[in-house]
Image (cartoon, rainbow, N blue to C red):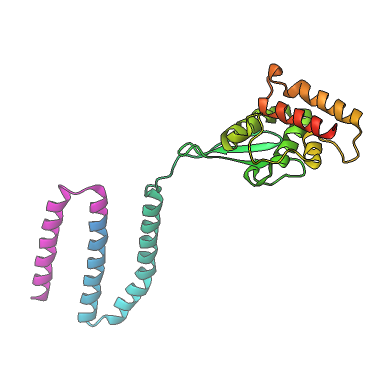
Amino acid sequence: MVWIALGSAALLLVLLALRGFASASVTQIRAALLWFAVFLALAIGGLLVLSGRGPMALFLLFALGPLAWRRWQARRLAQGFGAAPPPQGPAEDTVETATLSLRIDPTTGTMSGTVLRGRHAGRDLAMLQRSQIEEIFADCLENDPESLPLLETWIARMQPEEEGSAPRPGVAPMGREEALAVLGLQADASPDQVRTAYLRLMRVAHPDRGGSDWLAARLNEARDTLLR
């Protein structure tokens, strides 16, 4: 009777499986076959125990158990690799020269910059003072003209109030230390050195030569401050 009952159950399962396979996807079929294999293994193990062959059932369990576990782990790993990656926003646009690295977020338009060369290397442009930005600008005029458009773009985007040449109410005039930094001079610079540095930088920074109105105004202010 036991064999008849088991045979009937197996036949019923086969019929149900065939009916389901007709409309199932490949993934569903694989899952069904996996469960069928588990059920079949349990059924065989149960029959061995009922027939007094318990040691053989234990042998099959220890022999096939690790194999089944590895197959299940491999299946989970494959599903993980096949899963769609999480949605990500557009990557930042990055432009680099010898002195600067500028990054623009295409979603928000936010611009950030990092100094790559000189005594401010590694620092964020947004964390620098105006005199330090001017010092980098003056250095680029002489040593890295390719970086000038990037720095001008950053100034125009992040510090638009600095572009005008007219003095602003409440803003202190340029001091000697700041003027020296703008012209790239040492503290003991002579008037002749001031004029020479001014002319050298103005040849590149003048708007008629494709330079910046903002920097030209700052160079004029620095020269006037040091020659008073």
Considering depth in this image, is 84 or 151 the residue closer to the camera?
A: 151
- Residue 199 left/right relative to 164: right
Question: Residue 157 in magenta?
Answer: no
Picture residue at 39% right of the left edge, 68% below the top: 66
| Residue nearer the viewer, 22 or 6 | 22
The image quadrant of residue 173 is top right
Q: Is residue 217 above or below residue 56?
A: above
- Disc count in the image? 0
At horizontal 24% and vertical 80% (from top left) the residue drawn is 49
Most distant residue in the top direction: 208
Q: Residue at x 75, y 22 (%)?
A: 204
Residue 89 visible: yes
State whether residue 83 is above or below residue 170.
Answer: below
Residue at (69% x, 40% y) in the render: 130
Q: In the drawing, does residue 38 fall left or right of residue 192?
A: left
Residue 12 belongs to the span the image colors magenta: yes
Q: Quadrant of residue 98?
A: top right
Q: Position of residue 79 (x, y in %)?
A: 36, 53
Q: Quadrant of the N terminus?
A: bottom left
Which one is in front, 163 or 154?
A: 163
Horizontal side of 175 relative to 47 (left or right) equals right
Q: Is residue 153 left or right of residue 131?
A: left
Can residue 95 be seen?
Answer: no
Q: Main secondary structure of the magenta part?
A: helix
Look at the picture and state if 90 lies above or below 217: below
Residue 191 coordinates in the image, percent (x, y): 90, 30
**x, y percent for residue 92:** 52, 39
Q: Residue furthest front?
A: 169
Q: Which residues are magenta?
A: 1-30
